[in-house]
Amino acid sequence: MNQTFSGFARLLHWLMAAMILAMLFIGIGMVSSVNAYGILVAIHRPLGAAILLLAAVRLVYRLAVPTPPLPAAMPGPMKLIAHLSHYALYALMFAVPLVGWAMLSAGAYSVELYGALRLPPILPHDLPLYAGLRTAHTVLAILLFVTFLAHLGAALLHALVFRDGVFESMAIARHGRSTDGG
């Protein structure tokens, strides 16, 4: 496989990977630490908004610009799993922050971005809804983490075992011909 994702697509991919991984660990820290809760929440909320914004940019870019093809020799079931896992990642990159925003709205908490800049509530204040959305946010975050780990495992499998160019197509340092895909 000689084609690679564009520099912009690779930048979005790796930036979002770092942000999502940081966000997941910040979320774990929030629920397990009383002393650091305030500072972690102050990071968690605007980081979630940034992930949501970047997910939208990434989706628009991906729909507008074709991605490099998977290797022709890759078995059909593997291609299907690759496509389904990407759909799951995109769905979760939207669902986790949107459910978090909805949860905070239902709990009458603001989503502070920076200083006085806040996101508007997207749901009315409703404590039972807040409780349900809090559980949903946690479950979706765990699903995102599991999907993230599966994606990482597949990337390493392609890089170290299959050596079929799939990993290299999204690697920061790369060789080969670039397409505009993302």
Image (cartoon, rainbow, N blue to C red):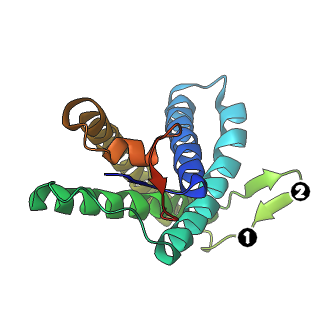
* Quadrant of residue 33 within the rendered picture: top right
Q: Residue under circle 1?
A: 120
Q: Can you see residue 37? A: yes
Q: How far from the left and from the top, in percent, is residue 36?
A: 66, 25
Question: Horizontally, is 29 left or right of 116 in the view?
Answer: left
Circle 1 crowding by C-alpha within 10 Å: few under 14, some 14–19, many from 20: few
Q: Amino acid at mark 2?
A: Ala
Disc assigned to residue 116: 2
Instruction: Name the secondary structure under disc 2.
Output: loop
Q: CA distance from mark 1 to mark 2?
A: 12 Å
Q: Is residue 104 visible?
A: no
| Residue placed most toward the observer, 130 or 30 | 30
Quarter assignment of residue 153 = top left
Q: Indicate left or right for 143 with 44 as reference.
A: left
As displayed, is residue 132 above or below residue 115?
A: below
Residue at (65% x, 57% y) in the render: 49
Amino acid bearing label 1? Pro
Does residue 30 lie above or below 79 as drawn?
above
Is label 1 in a helix, a strand or a loop? loop
Residue 58, position as x, y percentages in the image: 55, 64
The answer to which image quadrant residue 80 occupies is: bottom left
The residue positioned 25% from the left and 62% from the top of the image is 84
Nearest the camera: 91 or 43? Answer: 91
Q: Nearer the viewer, residue 162 or 80?
A: 162
